[in-house]
Image (cartoon, rainbow, N blue to C red):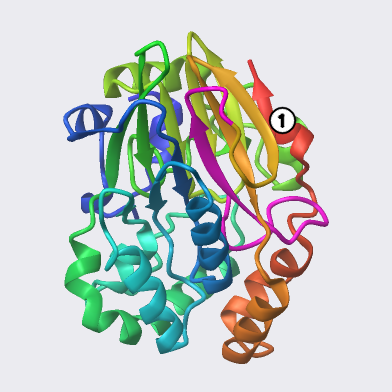
């Protein structure tokens, strides 16, 4: 086994989380009509205001775009009514245009036996962050109990085909973490070449911590039979042109800030033509016959903060871990570093 894979596949990763590129290539292919657009929404984290913004944005399209919620759509929604509404709008609304895959949060809150968040944090993560995430997930279990069967039955990956105007098929893989694990970290921007040394320093990553070569990601994507790979688990956004028509994209979080001084969420949109769509494009890459865009989720922050702070008081695990990011974004990450090319 390659050194970088061995280090990234933690022994704490549940067997049910393990996947391979072959699993994705064997999954059913959802073939969208010519000219359709695709939204991939990861890390909503129970932010009902962000969900409403996304619904309004996608409803403004002249066509009916497909929206796939790419896991961790629950997390901050300790309020039962908010949890139920998020669940109803995403899982209870599965149709030709609204679909979902599970993240580790959905898998763990649906499990009676789990005492973990299932995040499988890498060794450079503060252990207190892990403990607080475990506590947050534990508090959500009572809300999840009536929905456990629906949550547990969600797929952990999907494959979608978009058709360009020249009839070219563009295959998009939807995963939560990586093509080794639902909670994998080897596709995290801090671990993918070309290495951002400043980012690794900001995250206190050891110099000998494994790096994932671009060639390995391309190899995984070729085996998975996809041109674009969408993930979200590691929660720091980037899009990278890998060459040869291959693109990997992580939307970071739809439900909280992603960049320095910016409290807005972020989602991925994939277009196959030159059509104009609503929303603010933060950055984009054109490759392989499509445009892969990062779209700002400019949700009602005041309404969300009122809901969040009412449920998560001072000293609570969610407040301790996420108040800074929610209110000020990610202090060390900027948009110019998120749009990457080899």
* Nearer to us in this view, 10 or 192: 192
191 left or right of 17 in image: right
- Can you give x and y, in whole percent of width and height, for residue 244 in the image? 48, 8
- Which residue is painted at 23% across and 57% down in the image? 154
How packed mark 1 is, by other alpha carbons closer than 10 Å (few <14, some 14-19, many 20 or more), is few
65, above or below 83, in the image: above
- Can you give x and y, in whole percent of width and height, for residue 112 in the image? 22, 78
Return the residue at label 1. 196
Report the span colored magenta: 252-275
Residue 216 location, quadrant: top left
Q: Using the rendered image of the protein, determine whether residue 251 is visible from the camera's viewpoint.
A: no
* Nearer to us in this view, 287 or 222: 287
Furthest residue in direction front, as rendered: 62
Q: Quadrant of the C terminus?
A: top right
62 left or right of 280 in image: left
- Which residue is painted at 48% across and 54% down in the image? 59
Residue 308 location, quadrant: bottom right
35 left or right of 97 in image: right
Magenta stretch containing residue 15, yes or no? Answer: no
């Amino acid at each position: 086994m390659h050194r970088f894979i061995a280090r990234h596949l933690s022994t704490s990763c549940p067997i049910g989380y393990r996947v391979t590129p072959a699993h994705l290539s064997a999954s059913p292919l959802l073939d969208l009509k010519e000219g359709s657009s695709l939204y991939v929404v990861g890390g909503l984290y129970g932010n009902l205001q962000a969900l409403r913004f996304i619904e309004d944005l996608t409803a403004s399209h002249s066509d009916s775009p497909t929206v796939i919620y790419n896991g961790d759509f629950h997390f901050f929604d300790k309020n039962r009514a908010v949890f139920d509404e998020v669940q109803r709008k995403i899982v209870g609304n599965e149709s030709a245009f609204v679909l979902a895959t599970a993240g580790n949060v959905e898998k763990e809150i649906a499990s009676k036996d789990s005492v973990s968040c299932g995040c499988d944090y890498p060794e450079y993560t503060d252990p207190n962050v892990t403990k607080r995430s475990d506590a947050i997930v534990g508090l959500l279990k009572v809300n999840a109990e009536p929905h456990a069967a629906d949550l547990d039955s969600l797929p952990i990956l999907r494959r979608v085909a978009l058709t360009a105007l020249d009839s070219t098929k563009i295959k998009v893989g939807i995963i939560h973490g990586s093509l080794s694990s639902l909670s994998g970290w080897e596709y995290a921007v801090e671990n993918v070449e070309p290495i951002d040394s400043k980012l690794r320093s900001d995250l206190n990553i050891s110099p000998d911590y494994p790096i994932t070569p671009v060639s390995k990601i391309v190899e995984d994507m070729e085996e998975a039979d996809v041109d674009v790979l969408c993930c979200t688990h590691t929660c720091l956004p980037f899009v990278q042109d890998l060459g040869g028509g291959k693109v990997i994209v992580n939307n970071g979080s739809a439900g909280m800030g992603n960049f320095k001084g910016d409290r807005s969420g972020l989602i991925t949109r994939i277009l196959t033509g030159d059509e104009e769509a609503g929303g603010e494009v933060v950055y984009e890459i054109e490759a392989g016959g499509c445009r892969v865009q990062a779209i700002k989720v400019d949700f009602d922050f005041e309404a969300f903060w009122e809901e969040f702070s009412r449920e998560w008081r001072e000293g609570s695990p969610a407040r301790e871990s996420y108040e800074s990011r929610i209110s000020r974004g990610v202090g060390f990450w900027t948009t110019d570093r998120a749009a990457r090319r080899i």
